[in-house]
Image (cartoon, helix red, strand yellow):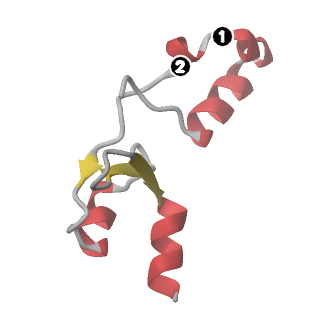
Amino acid sequence: ITGSVSESKVLSILLDNPYNLTKPVGEIMEKPFPFVSMEDTAERISSLISKKNSAVLVKDPVGQVHIITEYDLIRSISL
């Protein structure tokens, strides 16, 4: 995983200058989202999600990487 791009970052860059729409993704990427394990709890995941870090990544037993966003977390605790 090389980096991450969030909605808020893209929006911020476009509000600064609409011509930023032509920037390569590599120029707006931020640090990668952190990885969590399949055994981590919602409490642990919520401690990692913040304004600067809107998601976490988790690798399943077959090696596929999945993303858990702040919206996923909110949905899981509201059920």
With 20 as the anchor, is 71 left or right in this view? left
Q: Is there CB contact under 8 Å for labels 1 and 2?
A: yes
Q: Residue at x 44, y 82 (%)?
A: 77
Instruction: Please tell me whether mark 2 sits on a helix, a strand or a loop.
Output: helix
Q: Amino acid at mark 2?
A: Ile
Q: Residues within 10 Å of mark 1 (few under 14, many from 20)?
A: few
Q: Amino acid at mark 1?
A: Lys
**Could you say which is closer to the camera, residue 76 or residue 6?**
76
Tell me residue 35's x, y (percent): 27, 47
Residue at the front extreme? 62
Residue designated by label 2: 28
Tell me residue 79's x, y (percent): 52, 89
With 39 as the anchor, is 60 left or right in this view? right
Tell me residue 68's x, y (percent): 44, 57
| Position above or below: 47 against 16 | below
Q: Quadrant of residue 11?
A: top right
Q: Residue at x 41, y 43 (%)?
A: 52
With 28 as the anchor, is 39 left or right in this view? left
Q: Quadrant of residue 31?
A: top left
Tell me residue 43's x, y (percent): 26, 73
Q: Residues within 10 Å of mark 2 (few under 14, many from 20)?
A: some
Q: Residue at x 51, y 13 (%)?
A: 26
Q: Residue at x 36, y 51 (%)?
A: 56
Q: CA distance from mark 1 to mark 2?
A: 8 Å
Instruction: Please tell me whether mark 1 sits on a helix, a strand or a loop.
Output: loop
Residue designated by label 1: 23
Sequence-wise first label, 1 or 2: 1
